[in-house]
Image (cartoon, rainbow, N blue to C red):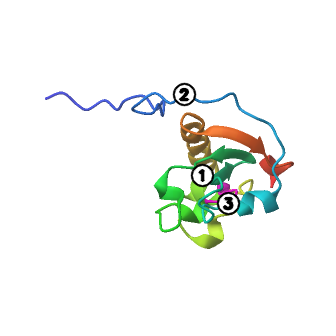
Amino acid sequence: MASHVPEPRNFAPKTEVKLAPPKSDPISLDELAKCDGKNAAGPTYVAIKGTVFDVTGNSAYAPGGAYHIFAGKDASRALAKSSLEAGDARAEWQDLGDKEKGVLADWFTFFSKRYNVVGVIPGGANL
C-alpha cells in the first residue's frame, strides 16, 4: 500500500485570479475600520502585518459571514492563532511563537494569491 504524500503548499487558488499590481497607498486604522463590509456600497478590507487586502465580494467577510470578525481590521494575531475570538482580531503578532508566525506567513501567502493589495497601514507591520 502506497503512503499518501502531501501536495506542496503553494496556496494557489483552484481557479486563476487576475490580480492588479499591489498598491502602497497609506490606509489609516480609522479608514480600515470603515471598510468592515457593513456598508454595501463600500469595500471590505482585511489587513495582515500592515498590508491591506480587498476581500470585497467574498461573503465570508461580509456581516454574518464566518470571517466577518477580520473585516475592517488588521487581523494578524487572530490569523496566526487560527482564532475567531474578537479580542484576537488585532495587529499585534511580534510576541507570538515561531509556529504561530509561520501560520501567519502562510495566511499572508494565501491572501496574496487571491486578493488585491490596496494599501498599507503606516508602521503596520510592526504593530
| Residue 90 placement (x, y as % from top left) | 70, 63
Tell me which amino acid carries mark 1. Glu
| Residue at 56% across, 47% down | 103
Q: Earlier in the sequence, mark 3 or mark 2?
A: 2
The boundaries of the magenta stretch are 71-76
Q: Is residue 14 visible?
A: yes
**Residues at marks 3 and 2 touching, judged by CB atoms closer than 8 Å:** no
Q: Nearer the viewer, residue 73 or 85?
A: 73
| Residue at 47% across, 57% down | 60
Report whether 30 appears left or right of 83. Answer: right
Q: Nearer the viewer, mark 1 or mark 2?
A: 2
Tag 3 residue: 72
Tag 1 residue: 100
| Residue 64 placement (x, y as % from top left) | 48, 68
Q: Residues within 10 Å of mark 1 (few under 14, many from 20)?
A: some
Q: Secondary structure at mark 2?
A: loop
| Residue at 48% across, 34% down | 11
| Residue 89 placement (x, y as % from top left) | 64, 64
Q: Nearer the viewer, mark 1 or mark 3?
A: 3
Give me the C-alpha separation between circle 1 and circle 2: 29 Å
What secondary structure characterizes most of the magenta part?
A: loop
Give me the C-alpha separation between circle 3 and circle 2: 23 Å
Tell me which amino acid carries mark 2. Lys
Q: Earlier in the sequence, mark 1 or mark 2?
A: 2
Q: Earlier in the sequence, mark 1 or mark 3?
A: 3
